[in-house]
Amino acid sequence: MQSIEDLADRWRLIYRTLASGTRRQLVGSLLEADAGQSLPLPEAANSPEYRLDPTLLMTNLKHEHLPMMADASFIEWDENPFRVRRGSRFDEIGRVLLAIDDSDNIPEHLIEGCYFHGEEVDS
């Protein structure tokens, strides 16, 4: 059984991970894929609405986003070829993102323009 401190640390890590649009997009892309499937990067992390420069995104993924998510076991990634797949604790963050997506109680201004499961949430 986890201690209260360990549980609080897990929640902080989930919140910190989902605070980034790039990381939310990556989790959403992995949710859409089959459980064992790997996805190409940087495409899987690039939002259809807010297209980021692929070279800059690739750098940010390698040096910030992917190491953070891999350290939490949310994802596993390879540099050559540049791909990502679900990690052993992906279910934790995936279920939280799905709960947000399924909730009618989240204020619209907090999710406007976000993509979950390939669908834009409009106001």
Image (cartoon, helix red, strand yellow):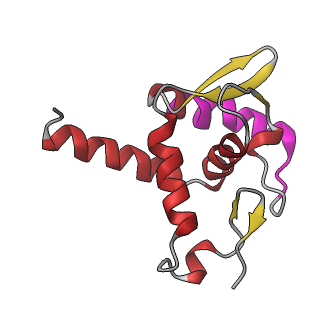
Name, please, the residue furthest toward the bottom: 123
Residue drawn at x 75%, y 25% as measured from the top left: 83
Residue drawn at x 65%, y 22% as measured from the top left: 77
Residue 93 seen in render: yes
Does residue 92 sit above or below 40 in this rendering?
A: below
Split into 4 quadrants, where in the image is the N terminus?
A: top left
Residue drawn at x 34%, y 49% as measured from the top left: 12
The x, y position of residue 42, in whole percent, is 80, 36
Residue span colored magenta? 51-68
Does residue 68 sit above or below 53 in this rendering?
A: above
Residue 86 is left or right of residue 37, and the answer is left
The x, y position of residue 100, in whole percent, is 51, 64
Name, please, the residue furthest toward the top: 80
Q: Would residue 65 be counted in the magenta stretch? A: yes
Residue drawn at x 83%, y 40% as measured from the top left: 43
Does residue 114 sit above or below 56 in this rendering?
A: below
Residue 19 seen in render: no
The image quarter containing residue 119 is bottom right
Name, please, the residue furthest toward the front: 34
The image quarter containing residue 84 is top right
Split into 4 quadrants, where in the image is the C terminus?
A: bottom right
Residue 28 is left or right of residue 17, and the answer is right
Does residue 53 sit above or below 74 in this rendering?
A: below
Dominant SS in magenta = helix
Q: Would residue 75 be counted in the magenta stretch? A: no
The x, y position of residue 66, in whole percent, is 61, 31
Count of numbered badges drawn on the protein: 0
